[in-house]
Amino acid sequence: MREEDTLARLGGDEFTVLMQELEKGDDAALLAEKVIEVAAQPVYIEEHTLYVTASIGISLYPKDGTKSNELLMYADNAMYKAKEEGRNNFQFYSAEMTALALSKLVMESNMRKALENEEFVLYYQPQMNGTNDELIGMEALVRWQHPTRGLISPAEFIPLAEETGLIVELDKWVMKTAMNQVSKWYKQGLNPGVLALNLAIKLLQQKDFIDVLKKLIEETTCKTEWLELEVTESQIMTNPEHAIAKLKEVSDMKIEIAIDDFGTGYSSLSSLKRLPIDKLKIDKSFINNLPDDEEDVSISKAIIALAKSLNLKVIAEGVETEEQKTFLLENECVNIQGYLYSKPIEAVDMEKFLVKQNNSKSV
C-alpha cells in the first residue's frame, strides 16, 4: 500500500482499503492482485501450515457513487461476486451486481413466506436395481410452487437457502413430509424401499440435530431402516472431523448414510475410510458422457472399484440411456437413478409407480 492509502477492519474477516488520488481506476486492480498474492503465502503456526485466500470487491468514486455508504455497499456486492466466481480473485462493481443483490433479498423474503404458507412440494425419483428393474428406494426432492412464477427449480433457491441459513428449516420440513409419506405407503402395503433424504451440512451442524431427527422418526412412525441420509462430499470436507462425529451418531441409529455427488469434493482416502458411510453416489457429471468419454469411463470405474474395496454400495445418478445402463451393469454398478426409469414425480404419481411395481411382482 501507498502512504496515502488507508486500511480499516470493518469486522469479522472483512477489511476495507481506501485508495485516494488514483490516476485511473484500473490501478486499484494492481493493489488487489498484490493483496491476493501476499495472502496466499503459507502461515506457519506450531506444526500447522495454514493458507488464506482473499476475495476482493472494488468500487470507484465518482463512477459508481459519491457517498461513502454507497461505495462501501457496492464494493461489498463486488466482493460477494468474487466469492461466487470461486474466491481468491477480485471483481469491479457493476450495476448488474446491485440488481442481483436486490433480487436475492426479494427471493429470501419470498422463501420465508413460502415456508409459512407451505408453498414447497416434494417430488420423488425412483432408485432401481438395473438387473431386474425393481424399485429399491427413492430420493425426495423439493420444489417451490410459487403462486405467481409457478414451479421454481431447486438450482435457483437451494444455494440461497444455504447462504441465508433457511436451509435448516426447509430440510426439517422436507424430512418430516417425506417420512410421513413413506410411512403411509408402508401402511398401505406398498414397498417404497429406502427413502433418501438430502441433508444440508448446516442442519447436521445444529447442536440439537440428533434430537430433532429422533423426534421426527417418532412423530412420523418412520422406521430407521427405511431411511438414508445423503450428504454431499464437498460439504463434508468443509469440516470433516465434526461431520464424522455427527454421522457416527446417525449411523448408530441404524440409518444409512450416502455420499452424494461423489468424485467432485476432493475428499482424501484417509477421511473417507473414517466416515461411517454405506453408499457412494456417482455424480451425474461423470455419467453424462458414458460410455464414449474415456475420462468419465476411468473415473466411474475407479469409484465403483473404490466402493467395492471399502465394502460400500454404489449408485449412479443421472442415468438417461440404455448405453449408460449397460456400461454400469457391466462394471458391477447395479443401482441406478435417472430419467431412464423416471423423472422426479409428485407423490400421487409415485404411488401409481409403487402400485405398478407391486402388481408386476404379483404376476
Image (cartoon, rainbow, N blue to C red):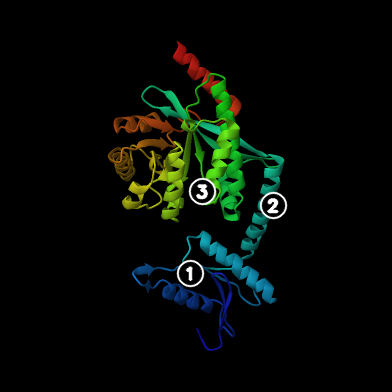
Instruction: Spot the residue most to the top.
Output: 363
Marks 1,3: beta carbons within 8 A = no
Residue under label 3? 204
Task: Measure the alpha-carbon separation of dots 2 and 3.
Answer: 24 Å
Q: Quadrant of residue 10?
A: bottom right
Q: Which of these two is toward me, 29 or 329?
A: 329
Badge 1 crowding class, 10 Å Cα cut-off, few under 14, some 14 to 19, many 20 or more, is many
Marks 2,3: beta carbons within 8 A = no
Q: Amino acid at mark 3?
A: Leu
Q: Secondary structure at mark 2?
A: helix
- On screen, residue 60 above or below 347: below
Instruction: Spot the residue most to the bottom.
Output: 3
Does residue 64 appear in this view? no
| Of the image marks 1 and 3, the number of the one nearer the N terminus | 1
Q: Position of residue 322 (x, y in %)?
A: 39, 29
Give the number of the mark in front: 2 or 3: 3
Q: Position of residue 269 (x, y in %)?
A: 32, 50
Q: Amino acid at mark 2?
A: Ser
Residue under label 1? 54
Task: Measure the alpha-carbon separation of dots 1 and 2.
Answer: 30 Å
Q: Secondary structure at mark 1?
A: loop
